[in-house]
Image: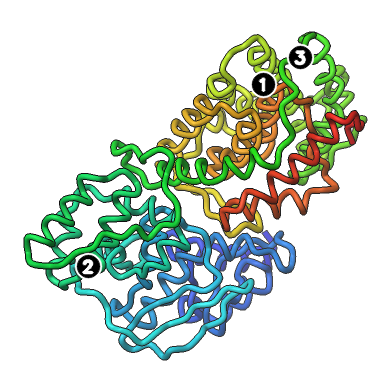
């Protein structure tokens, strides 16, 4: 090993040890000047502000935001602890979002601290931190999570304004659904004499179907001599009360978002053509779409795939043993995996055309698509066989996205309810749009989520009689921005309109791009 390489390796080993401590923030004092400058010069550190860094990848392009969004919460936890010790807490609203498992990176993080400077600290990529000089909740009302200090769930519900409830209905309902009983809320309501807040929380709980909790709050406060007037802080009512058996706020978040979004989808999507009269002809048209579908779907994911390579893979002329382990080889292996997965997806399409429930079909088939997609990479040792096991066991981040997918435990809670909603959904258009959106929103795999999400969308299109539809690589930016709007702002309209236009074009007979 050359001397420069040896020195860089030494610096990387020190950085690795720092990262093993779980720190998402690297202070200048954590590294010697020599190591810090060497790592920064080689792209392994990125400066957030003077004296503060995050780990980075040297192959990231200038302006790339993924490393920052992946580090945001850990960085803030370390930075705030460095400034304020234990005398700080995220604001009630932000605390409630996190209790509802909404880890979307905020544009501005609001923090309370008795020694705050009432000052904005600018961070990377348009994000910032605003610390406000304000009293903290009592010690037993502070909740520790992922190194962050939050208002406890009950304290946050009491402290949040009616406006927060109406502006963040999904997050607030998801947080409310995590309450195990009303007694912990009542302790705070009675101690503070919060009669108005009690009326608001009783109304909010009744809105999500927790009538027993609502009655308990109302009756207990009245028995204590308070004049309580129940009021619903939400602007609408749920069509279906939230189940009481769920343990994960993420599960109820998906239920709430599904109900919130489906009406917008139905209003904007073409009417379903209905089952095809000739199933064999329908499947043949799907086969004819393969070349374009593979090219565009893989190109969207950043692979450089030619039409010629795709044809070689399909015809069996491509020989993986004759290629070197370079980027071209990786592209070819990925194309082969896509072709194998495509064959399995066609079997799923045949099942739904034969009348099987499309939600059941994709639930039973999607892991097989995933295995076929990655099998060529496992076959030559680029991936370990264990990576075919199924849902991820670690955290994943989406490139350029402020949306943070659920942790691996929440994935295992979320996927069953996702498939339950698909099975029970009666509107073909809703199945089309929300199958794709929620699959990539949950992001259950470490890789391949976008490709499988588009496969899933097309199985749902087939179930409604819609033609196979390709998302063109030329529309990649609009496509990803629409998914981001749905994930971060809970606005499904841009994504619905985008997919609707593509589908309508296919119905009108426009050729596949």
Decide which of tag 1 and tag 2 comes sooner along the chain: 2
Of the pair 377 and 246, the residue shown nearer to us: 246
Decide which of tag 1 and tag 3 comes sooner along the chain: 3
Tell me how the rendering is colored.
rainbow
Using the image, tell me which numbered label, if any, was put on residue 276: 3
Using the image, tell me which numbered label, if any, was put on residue 463: 1
The span from disc 1 to disc 3 (Cα, nearest Å) is 9 Å
Secondary structure found at label 1: helix
Q: Kindly identify the residue that appears in the image at 52 percent across and 83 percent down.
A: 121
367, above or below 98, in the image: above
Decide which of tag 2 and tag 3 comes sooner along the chain: 2
Q: Kindly identify the residue that appears in the image at 58 percent across and 65 percent down.
A: 68
Which residue in the protein does label 2 denote? 141
Mark 1 touches mark 3? (CB < 8 Å): no
Horizontal placement of 20 versus 501: left or right? left
Of the pair 420 and 32, the residue shown nearer to us: 420
Secondary structure found at label 2: helix
How many neighbours does mark 2 have within 10 angstroms: few (below 14), some (14-19), or many (20 or more)? some
How many neighbours does mark 3 have within 10 angstroms: few (below 14), some (14-19), or many (20 or more)? some
Q: Kindly identify the residue that appears in the image at 18 percent across and 50 percent down.
A: 215
Please tell me in which quadrant of the rendered image residue 85 appears: bottom left
Give the total of numbered labels: 3
Horizontal placement of 423 versus 381: left or right? left
């Amino acid at each position: 090993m050359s001397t420069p390489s040896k020195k860089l390796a030494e610096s990387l080993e020190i950085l690795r040890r720092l990262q093993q401590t779980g720190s998402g923030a690297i202070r200048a004092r954590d590294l010697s000047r020599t190591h810090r400058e060497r790592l920064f010069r080689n792209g392994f550190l990125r400066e957030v502000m003077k004296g503060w860094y995050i780990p980075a990848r040297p192959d990231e392009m200038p302006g790339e935001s993924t490393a920052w969004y992946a580090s945001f919460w850990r960085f803030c936890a370390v930075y705030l602890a460095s400034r304020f010790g234990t005398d700080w807490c995220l604001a009630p609203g932000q605390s409630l979002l996190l209790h509802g498992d909404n880890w979307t990176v905020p544009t501005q993080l609001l923090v309370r601290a008795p020694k705050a400077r009432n000052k904005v600290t600018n961070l990377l990529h348009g994000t910032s931190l605003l610390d406000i000089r304000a009293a903290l909740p009592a010690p037993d009302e502070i909740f520790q999570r992922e190194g962050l200090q939050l208002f406890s769930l009950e304290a946050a519900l009491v402290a949040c304004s009616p406006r927060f409830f109406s502006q963040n209905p999904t997050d607030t309902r998801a947080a409310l659904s995590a309450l195990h009983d009303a007694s912990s809320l009542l302790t705070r309501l009675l101690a503070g004499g919060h009669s108005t807040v009690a009326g608001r929380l009783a109304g909010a709980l009744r809105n999500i179907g927790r009538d027993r909790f609502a009655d308990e709050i109302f009756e207990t406060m009245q028995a204590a001599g308070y004049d309580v007037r129940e009021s619903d802080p939400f602007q609408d009512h749920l069509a279906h009360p939230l189940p009481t058996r769920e343990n994960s706020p993420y599960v109820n978040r998906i239920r709430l978002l599904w109900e919130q979004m489906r009406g917008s989808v139905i209003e904007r999507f073409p009417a379903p053509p209905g089952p095809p009269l000739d199933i064999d002809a329908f499947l043949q048209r799907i086969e004819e779409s393969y070349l374009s579908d593979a090219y565009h779907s893989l190109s969207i994911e950043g692979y450089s795939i030619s039409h010629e390579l795709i044809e070689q893979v399909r015809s069996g002329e491509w020989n993986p043993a004759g290629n070197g382990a370079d980027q071209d080889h990786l592209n070819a292996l990925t194309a082969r995996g896509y072709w194998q997965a495509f064959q399995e997806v066609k079997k799923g399409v045949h099942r739904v055309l034969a009348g099987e429930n499309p939600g059941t079909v994709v639930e039973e088939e999607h892991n097989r698509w995933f295995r076929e997609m990655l099998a060529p990479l496992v076959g030559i040792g680029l991936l370990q066989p264990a990576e075919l096991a199924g849902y991820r066991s670690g955290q994943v981040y989406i490139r350029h996205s402020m949306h943070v997918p659920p942790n691996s435990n929440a994935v295992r809670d979320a996927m069953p309810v996702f498939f339950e909603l698909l099975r029970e959904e009666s509107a073909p258009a809703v199945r089309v749009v929300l199958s794709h959106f929620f699959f990539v929103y949950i992001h259950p795999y470490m890789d391949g989520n976008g490709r499988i999400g588009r496969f899933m969308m097309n199985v749902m299109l087939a179930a409604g009689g819609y033609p196979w539809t390709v998302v063109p690589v030329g529309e990649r930016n609009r496509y990803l921005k629409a998914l981001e709007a749905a994930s971060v702002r809970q606005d499904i309209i841009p994504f619905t309109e985008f997919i609707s236009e593509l589908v309508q074009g296919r119905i009108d007979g426009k050729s596949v791009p």
